[in-house]
């Protein structure tokens, strides 16, 4: 993807008299920042109405044209499941930045419930952008699941700073998502399983072992990650979810949202998104893939990637489709073209 990383010997000899390429080089990709080396980790001071806190980021590589900030899901999960992308993004010369949002594992974890609002999270992302020196010439934002909501909100508020946007596995309407969960996902499960799950939820027994016994084979391994053995990175990310944030914003049920995000809907605002935008859907996702395809037609410069074998964590259970599509999009924008993938 990145020009100048590796050229055939004959071509190198033939171009010996030409100027050196201006693009990133392999050596440059691994050039460290000045000062004490900390493996790319940078804790960023975040100002909030409830005081100052720090959030954890980790930069991998260096590319002056392509800097990809990753927004994890949850809300309240961690960056760790994005490790699925690590080898391929590095091999392609993409600089990417892990980031645990406030309240997530490696970042500060305040308990004031008033902090968990969309506007404050958007402001946090903007403070992270400024601290990392990202701008319209290099800044790509990938939001997955809840991170897709946050990415869309950020793009609507600060789109002039973005070079490219990726909305991954997240519908742009929670009411539409709830309807899809009820009318499509639930009907794909055995009726007796759905009845028992709903009975447990009606009693508020979300921590019941039986609840998980039903969800893991019938929902998680069908719609969240279809791999028989879940990768360690997925277990770590989901195992560290901040339940205070998750329940407050998403709600306790896995069948639709009932928290602060319950009425969130940005469908009408999608035409305002003017930056190149890739929308990623998956055939077995909790999110309606046809809705995701539609989203790509509503933004001004949209592309769509369908992960035919993937679910909500398509970067794991349909890994090559996900990564190749992402790299194709980044490369197209880098070369000044428009990537269209249907």
Image (tube, rainbow, N blue to C red):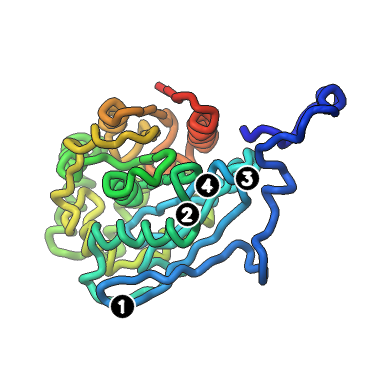
| 3D distance between C-alphas at marks 4 and 1 | 29 Å
Residue 190 screen position, x and y as percent: 24, 40
**Quadrant (top left/top right/bottom left/bottom right) for the N terminus:** top right
For numbered disc 3, what is the local secondary structure?
Answer: helix
Classify 10 Å Cα crowding around label 2: few (below 14), some (14-19), many (20 and above).
Answer: some
| 3D distance between C-alphas at marks 2 and 3 | 20 Å
> Mark 4 or mark 3, which has the lower sequence index?
4
Q: Is residue 326 left or right of residue 272?
A: right
Residue 225 visible, this orientation = no
Front residue of 62 and 215 = 62
Classify 10 Å Cα crowding around label 3: few (below 14), some (14-19), many (20 and above).
Answer: some
> Mark 3 or mark 1, which has the lower sequence index?
1
> Mark 4 or mark 1, which has the lower sequence index?
1
**What mark, if any, has residue 67 been given in the picture?**
4
| 3D distance between C-alphas at marks 3 and 1 | 36 Å
| 3D distance between C-alphas at marks 2 and 4 | 24 Å
Q: Is residue 227 above or below residue 133?
A: above
Q: Is residue 260 left or right of residue 35?
A: left
**What mark, if any, has residue 172 been given in the picture?**
none
For discs 2 and 3, the disc positioned in front in the rendered view? 3
Q: Which residue is located at x 71 percent, y 37 percent?
A: 5
**Pointer 2 residue:** 234
For numbered disc 1, what is the local secondary structure?
Answer: strand
**Quadrant (top left/top right/bottom left/bottom right) for the C terminus:** top left
Q: Is residue 175 left or right of residue 152?
A: left
For numbered disc 4, what is the local secondary structure?
Answer: strand
**Pointer 1 residue:** 51
The tally of labels here is 4
Q: Is residue 168 above or below residue 204?
A: above
Q: Is residue 315 left or right of residue 167?
A: right
For discs 4 and 3, the disc positioned in front in the rendered view? 4
């Amino acid at each position: 993807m990145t020009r100048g990383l590796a050229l055939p010997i004959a071509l190198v000899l033939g171009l010996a008299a030409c100027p050196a390429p201006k693009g990133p080089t392999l050596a440059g990709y691994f050039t460290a920042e000045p000062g004490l080396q900390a493996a790319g980790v940078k804790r960023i001071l975040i100002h909030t109405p409830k005081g100052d806190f720090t959030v954890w980021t980790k930069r991998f590589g260096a590319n002056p044209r392509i800097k990809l900030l990753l927004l994890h899901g949850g809300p309240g999960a961690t960056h760790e499941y994005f490790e699925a992308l690590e080898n391929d993004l590095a091999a392609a010369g993409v600089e990417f930045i892990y980031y645990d949002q406030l309240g997530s594992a490696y970042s500060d974890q305040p308990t004031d419930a008033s902090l968990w609002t969309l506007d404050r999270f958007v402001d946090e992302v903007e403070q992270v952008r400024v601290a990392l020196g990202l701008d319209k010439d290099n800044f790509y934002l990938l939001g997955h699941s809840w991170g897709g909501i946050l990415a869309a909100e950020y793009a609507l508020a600060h789109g002039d700073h973005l070079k490219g946007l990726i909305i991954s596995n997240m519908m742009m309407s929670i009411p539409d998502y709830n309807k899809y969960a009820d009318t499509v996902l639930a009907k794909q499960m055995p009726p007796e399983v759905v009845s028992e799950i709903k009975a447990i939820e009606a009693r508020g027994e979300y921590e019941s072992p039986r609840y998980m016994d039903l969800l893991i084979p019938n929902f998680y391994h069908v719609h969240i990650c279809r791999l028989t053995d879940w990768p360690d990175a997925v277990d770590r990310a989901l195992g560290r979810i901040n339940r205070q944030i998750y329940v407050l914003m998403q709600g306790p049920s896995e069948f639709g949202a009932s928290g602060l995000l319950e009425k969130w809907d940005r469908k009408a605002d999608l035409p305002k998104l003017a930056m190149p935008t890739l929308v990623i859907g998956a055939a077995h996702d909790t999110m309606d893939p046809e809705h995701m395809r539609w989203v790509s037609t509503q933004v001004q410069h949209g592309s769509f990637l369908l992960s035919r074998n993937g679910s909500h964590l398509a970067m794991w259970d349909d890994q090559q489709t996900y990564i190749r599509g992402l790299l194709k999009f980044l490369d197209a924008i880098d070369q000044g073209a428009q990537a269209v993938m249907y």
